[in-house]
Amino acid sequence: MTFKVATQCGDIACGCGCVEVDMDTPGTIVLRDTQGREVYYDNREWAVFIAGVKDGQFDLSPEALAELAAEDAAKKAETAPEPAPVG
């Protein structure tokens, strides 16, 4: 399988909630999240899913988006390298 990620996501290892999509197998679309979980769709299911995305069915509330942003900032702060000692 050849997974592709949106250019807006950059590195999938960022942990930012992006997904990868594989469409190499005829009639099967595979969606993989940052933890490696995969969901398989046939062409009809994929079309319904994409229509739902475009319709905003999966949009998060402003509160949920703020919570995710805070969690992301906390994760980045935990993994930030220590500053080099001066002197």
Image (cartoon, grey):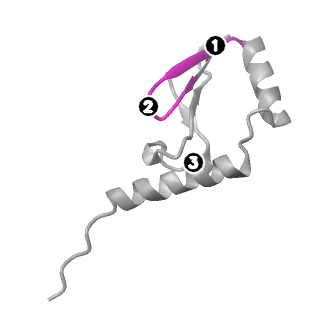
Residue 13 in percent (x, y) is at 43, 44
Above or below, 35 against 16 in this view is above
Above or below, 3 against 47 in this view is below
Q: Amino acid at mark 3?
A: Cys
What SS does tag 3 mark? Answer: helix
Q: Nearer the viewer, residue 56 or 11?
A: 56
Q: Give the class, few, some or many, for how many residues have Cα within 10 Å of label 2's Cα (few <14, many ≥20).
A: few
From mark 1 to mark 3, how far is it between C-alphas?
Answer: 23 Å
Give the residue displayed 33% in from the left and 56% down from the top: 79
Residue 63 in percent (x, y) is at 68, 51
- Does the magenta segment cover residue 62? no
Q: Write down the residue under mark 2.
A: 35
Q: Give the class, few, some or many, for how many residues have Cα within 10 Å of label 3's Cα (few <14, many ≥20).
A: some
Q: Earlier in the sequence, mark 1 or mark 3?
A: 3
What SS does tag 2 mark? Answer: loop
Q: Amino acid at mark 1?
A: Thr
Q: Nearer the observer, disc 3 or disc 2?
A: 2
Give the residue displayed 53% in from the left and 50% down from the top: 10
Tell me: 66 left or right of 81: right
Residue range in magenta is 31-42
Q: Write down the residue under mark 3.
A: 9
From mark 3 to mark 2, how far is it between C-alphas?
Answer: 15 Å
Q: Earlier in the sequence, mark 3 or mark 2?
A: 3
Q: Nearer the observer, disc 1 or disc 3?
A: 3
Give the residue displayed 80% in from the left and 20% down from the top: 48
Above or below, 49 against 25 in this view is below
Q: Earlier in the sequence, mark 1 or mark 2?
A: 1
Q: Write down the residue under mark 1.
A: 28
Q: Nearer the observer, disc 1 or disc 2?
A: 2
